[in-house]
Amino acid sequence: MGAMSEQDALVHVHQRLSSRHSELTSEEILVVIQSAHASFDESPIRDFVPLLVERRAGAELSARESPTSV
């Protein structure tokens, strides 16, 4: 079985984050994923980029949900 491409892995990241953050639109989640992915553009080693993108995007989406204390 061949390795999954980075883009295929990011599709799965989008699916997982969409199921966890159903109150957000698919487009909102996609923007966060694209922003997180862009932050790794200069990374020479790509193997773990989808995992890192999922963690970074997931943290940002969770922060949007959490009430801020004043």
Image (tube, rainbow, N blue to C red):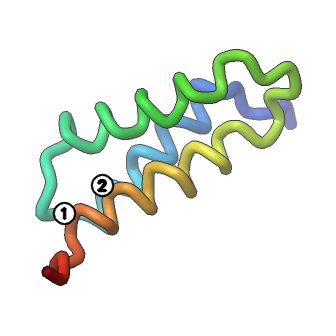
Which amino acid lies under the numbered mark 1 shown in the image of this protein? Ser
The residue beneath circle 1 is 22
Q: Measuring from the top left, give residue 68's x and y in whole percent.
A: 18, 76
Q: Measuring from the top left, give residue 10's x and y in whole percent.
A: 53, 36
Please identify the residue farthest to the front as the structure is shown.
Answer: 70
Apparent side of residue 47 relative to residue 61 in the rendered image (left or right): right
Q: Is residue 67 above or below residue 28?
A: below
Q: Callout 1 environment at 10 Å: few (<14), some (14 to 19), or many (20+)? A: few
Seen from the viewer's position, the closer of residues 24 and 60 is: 60
Apparent side of residue 40 relative to residue 60 in the rendered image (left or right): right
Query: Could you tell me if the residues under marks 1 and 2 are in contact, i.e. CB atoms within 8 Å?
Result: yes
Residue name at image x 30 percent, y 32 percent: 31
From mark 1 to mark 2, how far is it between C-alphas?
6 Å
Q: Quadrant of residue 17?
A: bottom left
Q: Quadrant of the N terminus?
A: top right
Q: Is residue 50 above or below residue 57?
A: above
The residue beneath circle 2 is 18
Residue name at image x 44 percent, y 59 percent: 58
Residue name at image x 64 percent, y 40 percent: 50
